[in-house]
Amino acid sequence: MTLDPTSPANQIRADLKAAGYKTTQVSVRHHHYSMGSTIHVTIRDEAVDHDEVERIAKGEERISRDEMTGEILCGGNRFVDIHYSSKLESIWAERYAADALAAAAQAEANHRRHFPVGDTAARIYYDDNGYNGLLATIPGRHGRPTMISTGNDGQHAGEVIGRILHQAGLIGVDSATADRLAAEKEAAEMAEWEAAEAKRKADREAAEAQAEEEPAADNVVRGAFVPETDQAAADQAQAEALGADARIAARKTLAGQIRLAEGIDQLLRAIVDAVPDVDRLPEDLAAVILSADRLAEKVVTWRTAAVDRLVASCAG
């Protein structure tokens, strides 16, 4: 039987092969059912880059959502599920179980304090405000902590530790190195953000300066006597003057909205920056901080679009 190279699963297989992965490292299966389908991508080798596999596989995901609520609509969806093989998780269970049990015992005796899992970047703590149980996390990484259990000689805890370390690209990386890498990543992201902010500010100021230099429509004399032969030209001049008024007003409105968005963005980021380790907060308060972070990103996206509209209007 000839495989269809255009099928989503085969496209993922081809892209994974192009990225240098063998089928023994990552396997792909496509499960069809009455209301849609799911592509199951199984990582079998810890040398595989989780983020790269996710980028490749998620490119074939197709989910229909309600435009107003964002809810997933029934029928015709194609989901992508990325998980690990039981063999690989068993290896992690054996490797990390003992250290995970030791950290869990300390966490249960000292609620809300984070305890390292061996010399890895992973931490375990006990949350008694929402989760009411043991949680595994990597400080400095956004995302919900993962619940763990200490049953079956810590097998589940070891599997969870291996999973979150692999997803963060920190398998085999000691705690000190992980902290250094996190600090470098944060510094690079901040430098990138500051450069983008400087460019947006320069574009906005240039657009505002051009808007201020636009000739005011009020300087156009309206209603004066014009010979009948020149009436058409006068009407056109008046229409252009009114159009200039509208453009100037629109540009000033956009500039005001951009300044407001900047103020909101600075306020939200001040809230987020005031909390160095969101994982240490109770769940409800952590949710507020994470929501502020996501809202700040949306404000920046909206402001960027507004600046682009302002620059485009001036260029026109």
Image (cartoon, grey):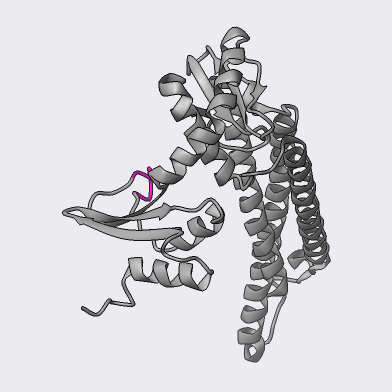
Report the quarter where the N terminus lies: bottom left
Q: How many marks?
A: 0
Q: Position of residue 94 (x, y in %)?
A: 50, 34
Q: Which residues are magenta?
A: 66-71
Residue 309 figure quarter: bottom right
| Quarter that holds the C terminus | bottom right
For residue 58, what is the image quadrant?
A: bottom left
User: Does residue 246 appear to the left or right of 86 in the view shown?
Assistant: right
Verify whether residue 111 appears in magenta: no
Closest to the observer, 239 or 86 = 86
Q: Work out whether residue 149 can be spotted.
A: no
195 on left or right of 106? right
Tell me the residue at 71%/62% (across/down): 248
- Give the residue at the far bottom of this rendering: 229
| Residue found at the very far left of the displayed protein | 34
Where does the image place residue 131, in percent across and percent down from the top left? 48, 18
Residue 112 position within the rendered picture, expressed as x and y whole percent measured from the top left? 62, 15
Name the chief secondary structure element in magenta: loop
Quarter occupied by residue 283: top right
- Residue 266 vs 20, above or below: the answer is above
Question: In the rendering, at what x and y percent does residue 258 appear?
Answer: 70, 50
Residue at 71% over, 43% down? 260
- In the picture as drawn, the residue positioned furthest to the top comes out as 109
281 or 242: which is nearer to us?
281
102 relative to 45 in the view: left or right: right
Note whether residue 248 is visible: yes
